[in-house]
Image (cartoon, rainbow, N blue to C red):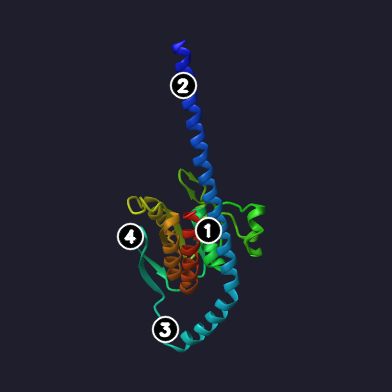
Amino acid sequence: ESETLFQEREREREREKEGKGRERTMKRKGLTAAVLALMLALGMLAGCANSAASDSDQASSGQQGASTAHATERTITDMAGREVTIPTEVKGVYCAVPTGEATVATLAPDKLIGWVNEPSEEALRYLPENFAKLPVVGGWMGQNVTANIEDIIALDPDVIIYMGSGKSIGSDTSIPDDIQTQTGIPVVVVSSDLADTATVYRQLGDWLDEADRGEQLASYYEKHFADITSK
């Protein structure tokens, strides 16, 4: 009898653990869904800003044309502490990991020139029409490397964006260093942590010559992400 009672108690403990596990999973799924919805909202915000930004860029371009020539390159320090020389004018961007694509798609959609994975039909419903025509060239997803180096080089991006965990982002830069060596294209590293998203928008906004939009999206993200995480 005592053995049976002990077994029943053990089963109760297991059921309690499973219940708590399901509760934690539901919370994580809820936060993920909320963040994805926020990213979609950011994309819509960026889309609405495109027209005004274009007019502003044209005016700015005219002023710059009248001034003396600027340097064609500059050296920046990325979020992994690496010094990277990038063009002052970035027209094309390839993201080595899928997480970077969502950020660039909302920040500078006209500069994204290729996909790591083919977007789903559902995702394409929320993206500009030209995104469906972008080539799929693979990428770096942990141990799963699908990148086609020749195809990436053929895309001729000005910059490659690599995202890594903010907690260990500077401790091992072998992957971005290797990508840069293989392609001969500057690779900048930014954090994939949700808490760093606003900083990433500001950094990429500076590097991709989209500073105003980067600040706009960073401020929007900070406000709404705080609302989501406080609930």
- Residue at 50%, 56% (x, y): give it: 228
Give how far across and how far down residue 157 sits, in percent.
50, 64
Of the pair 229 and 131, the residue shown nearer to us: 229
According to the image, label 2 marks what residue? 9
- Mark 1: few, some, or many residues within 10 Å (few <14, many ≥20)? many
122 left or right, relative to 169 = right
Contact? badges 2 and 1 (CB < 8 Å): no
Q: Amino acid at mark 1?
A: Glu
Q: Amino acid at mark 4?
A: Gly
Q: CA distance from mark 2 to mark 3?
A: 78 Å
The first of marks 2 and 1 along the sequence is 2
Q: CA distance from mark 4 to mark 1?
A: 22 Å
- Residue at 61%, 53% (x, y): give it: 119
According to the image, label 4 marks what residue? 81
- Mark 3: few, some, or many residues within 10 Å (few <14, many ≥20)? few
Would residue 112 be seen by someone viewing this image from the given angle? no
The first of marks 1 and 3 along the sequence is 3
| Up/down of 215 relative to 164, above or below | below
- Residue at 47%, 32% (x, y): give it: 17
Q: Amino acid at mark 2?
A: Arg
| Front label number (2 vs 3) | 2
Give how far across and how far down residue 82 sits, in percent.
34, 60
